[in-house]
Image (cartoon, helix red, strand yellow):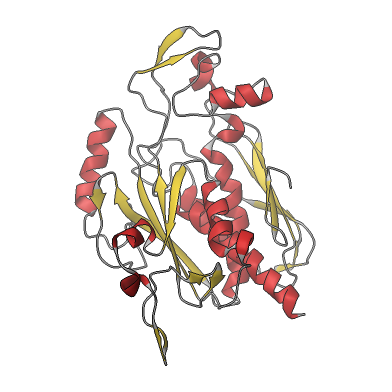
Amino acid sequence: MSANTFGNLFRVTTFGESHGKALGCIIDGCPSGVGIDEGFIQSEMDRRRPGGTRIGTARNEGDRVSILSGVYEGLTTGTPIAMVLFNENQKSSDYDGLKDVFRPGHADYTYLKKYGLRDPRGGGRSSGRETSARVAAGAVAKLVLKGYGIRIDAAVRSVKDIVVDGGFEPPFTPPLFTVNGSRDEEILALIEKTRKDQDSLGGIVECHIKGVPAGLGDPVFDKVEAVLAHAEMSIGAVKGIEFGLGFGATQINASVMNDQMDADGFMTNNAGGMLGGITTGEDIVFRLAVKPTPSIAKPQKTVDVDGNARTVSITGRHDVTILVRILPVVEAMAAMTILDLMLENLRYER
């Protein structure tokens, strides 16, 4: 499997760089006859796009998606779907002073070690901008899943040490899209303070997948947790994942942890919608640890390609936190994963 391709039956290949001419994706294996709502696809892109929120980067990309193939008169044809979006607001000159310097927290050093060269303009292929193509593909997957009654929602559970307790209550309120909005004012104040300090913030994102039938997934190596973890951990800023109670399960006894059943079904959902790596029919629930944006203006120590000590300040247009913009990416990877599992089960049923 190519390192740029994800999925088995619903396969997505992404291409393009942060400061290249364009980014895009090719979807192979999408069922035919699915209605493609281009307005919905664009609305998903708008959620992720640079300049889309007042708390994010000043880089303002339209991220207008063009569908090149695989759709006729609003329906998928079953042939490969190609989508492209052109970069329009790059400022590659922001990176002129970083061509020979390894930026702390970025993949500059590792890309050079692996490939022998690297694209210094915004990180090239390792840039978070690559995820725009994933969101386009994920929007198509969501449209397919809608026909099965499956819905995916992600929201911000915490920002640094400010945890938003309580329920997960969509629809979520801009500009922060926290799980219930109860601590938004504190978080906004923290973001502004961090911006003035020339630093950045991470936090936790929570995702719920509703309407998934019981019986998806394979035991042993292809457990649902395993394939979802693969999908979500492939997002560059994600550093950890937990399902259901997650690490909290280590603090309780089995008599509390076990999801007991009665005549109406499961009485709790501590396992997060999966047992033995197979879906139970309950909501799939997981949380992701998202690191602070590595590009900050605060001076940091590093070295150049010759091993000389350097101090760098990353200028340009960068997010204080990517927690809001990562939400549609998280949902997109979940959608591609669940659709792939659905198609696998349908193949067995035939």
Q: Is 305 placed left or right of 1 in the picture?
A: left
Q: Is residue 190 left or right of residue 210?
A: left
Q: Nearer the viewer, residue 262 or 317?
A: 262
Q: Nearer the viewer, residue 256 or 15?
A: 256
Question: Does 44 appear above or below 84?
Answer: below
| Image mark count | 0
Q: Note whether 197 is above or below 26 in the view shown.
A: above
Image quadrant where one finds the C terminus: bottom right
Please tell me in which quadrant of the rendered image residue 67 appears.
bottom right
Q: Is residue 95 left or right of residue 184?
A: right
> Residue 7 falls in which quadrant of the image?
bottom right
State whether residue 39 appears in this view. no
- Residue 135 in the image, given as x and y percentages of width and height: 56, 53
Residue depicted at 39% across the width and 81% down the height = 260
Q: Measuring from the top left, give residue 127's x and y in whole percent.
A: 54, 35
Asked whether residue 288 is in view, the answer is yes
Q: Please report the residue visible at 22 percent of the width from the left and 60 percent of the height from the top.
A: 182
* Residue at the spot 51% in from the left edge and 17% down from the top edge: 98
Which residue is nearer to you in this view: 201 or 121? 201
Quadrant position of residue 38: bottom right
Q: Looking at the picture, does residue 88 appear above or below residue 254?
A: above
Residue 257 x %, y % = 35, 70
Q: Nearer the viewer, residue 29 or 69?
A: 29
- Image height of 212 relative to 188, above or below: below
Look at 42% across and 93% down and name the residue there: 263
- Residue 52: x and y, percent? 43, 47
